């Protein structure tokens, strides 16, 4: 669906789909059936390549199955059944996912169905402009921290507190139609403002 220079269309990703009725575009289905997905067999994705993957796609799921590209499945070169922690490429998936999470150009949230989702900086103004079309809790930034006791703790920064001022200004000057186009949303004319 995405071509060179066009953002990944996500209008159908944002609706909740029962697992048996999940919509997969032909590109996603073909991608999931193609071993290696363009990476040479045995080749490992690097952290910069993982960040470039998110930049190119705009919106990426960390590891969940869904209609958006999955970073973990892309690294694995195959759909992952169960937890990626048990996959033979778990160490590489961990390194790359943490590199993406640490990027200042990536929002980590639960945009798609409550699953960990990466949104590249170039789409932030569109998200801010159309924030009223999303569940507010799915726009909260999340960050995992490790406590001194060795536990993992999720820190949530509510929307719009995480939004940089520059992004707010960009969103204010962005037309709703353009924002919808950036996200690939199909909106009714009367809802645009």
Image: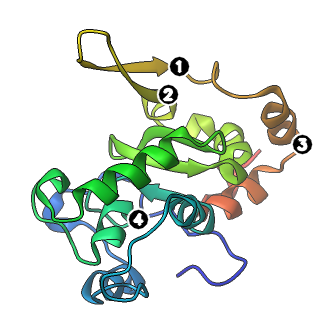
**With 29 as the anchor, is 97 left or right in this view?**
right
Give the residue displayed 85% in from the left and 33% down from the top. Answer: 166
Q: Nearer the viewer, residue 91 or 120?
A: 91
Question: For residue 68, which numbered disc appears in the image?
Answer: 4
Q: Residue 179, how many percent across, how many down?
A: 72, 54
Q: Residue 37, how many percent across, how many down?
A: 38, 84
Judge depth for marks 3 and 4 and give the one in front.
4
Give the residue displayed 37% in from the left and 79% down from the top. Answer: 28
For marks 1 and 4, the one nearer the N-term is 4
Mark 3 closeness class: few <14, some 14–19, many ≥20 residues within 10 Å: few
Q: Is residue 33 depicted above or below 16 in this figure?
A: below
Mark 4 closeness class: few <14, some 14–19, many ≥20 residues within 10 Å: many
The local secondary structure at tag 4 comes to: loop
For marks 4 and 2, the one nearer the N-term is 4
For marks 2 and 3, the one nearer the N-term is 2
The local secondary structure at tag 3 comes to: loop
Question: For residue 140, which numbered disc appears in the image?
Answer: 2
Q: Residue 97, how many percent across, how many down?
A: 41, 50
């Amino acid at each position: 669906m995405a071509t060179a220079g066009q953002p990944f269309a996500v209008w159908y990703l944002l609706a909740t789909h029962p697992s048996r009725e999940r919509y997969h575009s032909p590109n996603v289905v073909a991608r999931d059936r193609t071993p290696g997905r363009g990476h040479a067999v045995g080749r490992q994705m690097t952290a910069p390549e993982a960040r470039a993957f998110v930049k190119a796609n705009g919106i990426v799921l960390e590891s969940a199955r869904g209609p958006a590209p999955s970073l973990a499945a892309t690294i694995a070169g195959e759909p992952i059944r169960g937890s990626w922690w048990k996959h033979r490429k778990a160490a590489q998936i961990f390194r790359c996912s943490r590199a993406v999470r640490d990027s200042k150009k990536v929002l980590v949230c639960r945009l798609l169905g409550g699953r960990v989702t990466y949104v590249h900086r170039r789409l932030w103004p569109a998200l801010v402009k159309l924030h009223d079309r999303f569940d507010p809790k799915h726009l909260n930034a999340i960050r995992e921290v490790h406590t001194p006791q060795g536990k993992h703790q999720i820190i949530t920064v509510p929307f719009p507190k995480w939004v940089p001022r520059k992004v707010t200004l960009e969103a204010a000057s962005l037309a709703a139609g353009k924002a919808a186009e950036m996200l690939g949303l199909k909106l009714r004319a009367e809802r645009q403002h």
